[in-house]
Image (tube, rainbow, N blue to C red):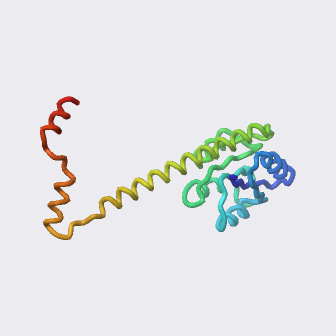
């Protein structure tokens, strides 16, 4: 089951978020500050972060910037009561998946969480596929001929044979 971090300094809001999402079967950890969440992430892994924008110390925006790339990369959803157009632009440039203005309906948050997790899963799968292809291509080019005779054999086996069958297929296509 996906693991979600909730970073919220208001205890009642943190409780409401975790209770609302626990019904969907997520594993949830809550933190009062972004620094606490960041320290936890140094030794653990999560699939999604939901953070308030304004927090004591490091802001939700700063946390989102740290979680944009690298081994901690994951979607971030920001919840805030202070969303100006400039703030929204900054959040977008930091790679925030979605910003929900407080107050919001729990159903809207659930939908955003499911979309973010599906997007992250698809991106992870695409990265694995690219890595597997690169590894396969790398492994297939590692054969180095030990002698000129071996090199000639390899060159002759990688070129298509010139035969009438090959020519007639080429004309038909």
The quadrant holding residue 47 is bottom right
Q: Which of 7 and 60 is in front in this view?
A: 7
Q: 87 or 66: which is nearer to us?
A: 66
Residue at left offset 61%, top offset 42%:
89
User: What count of labels does the image hold?
Assistant: 0
Q: Position of residue 107 (x, y in %)?
A: 77, 37
Give the image location of residue 67, x and y in percent: 61, 56
Q: In terms of depth relative to the viewer, which is nearer, 148 or 110?
A: 148
Left or right of 134: which side holds 46?
right
Considering the image in quadrants, where does the C terminus appear?
A: top left
Q: Which residue is drawn at 76% across and 55% down?
A: 28
The residue furthest front is 165
The answer to which quarter of the image holds residue 166 is top left
Q: Is residue 162 above or below residue 70?
A: above
Quarter occupied by residue 115: top right
Farthest residue, direction bottom: 146
Q: Which residue is drawn at 16% across and 46% down?
A: 161
Residues 93 and 71: in front is 71
Where residue 87 appears, as percent x and y from the top left, is: 66, 44
Q: What residue appears at the point 71 percent right and 63 percent down from the top-left corner? A: 35
Residue 56's x, y, as percent? 76, 58
Q: In this view, does 9 lie to the left or right of 126?
A: right
């Amino acid at each position: 089951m996906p693991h979600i971090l909730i970073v919220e300094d208001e205890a009642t809001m943190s409780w409401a978020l975790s209770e609302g999402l626990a019904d969907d079967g997520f594993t949830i950890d809550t933190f009062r500050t972004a620094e606490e969440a960041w320290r936890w992430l140094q030794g653990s892994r999560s699939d999604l972060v939901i953070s308030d924008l304004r927090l004591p110390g490091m802001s939700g925006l700063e946390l989102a910037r740290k979680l944009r790339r690298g081994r901690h990369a994951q979607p971030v959803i920001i919840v805030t009561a202070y969303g100006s157009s400039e703030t929204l632009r900054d959040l977008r440039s930091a790679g925030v998946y979605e910003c929900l203005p407080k107050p919001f309906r729990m159903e809207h948050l659930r939908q955003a969480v499911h979309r973010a997790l599906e997007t992250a899963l698809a991106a992870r799968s695409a990265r694995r596929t690219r890595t597997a292809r690169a590894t396969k291509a790398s492994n297939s080019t590692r054969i180095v001929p030990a002698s000129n005779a071996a090199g000639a054999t390899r060159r002759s086996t990688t070129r298509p044979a010139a035969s009438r069958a090959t020519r007639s297929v080429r004309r038909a296509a």
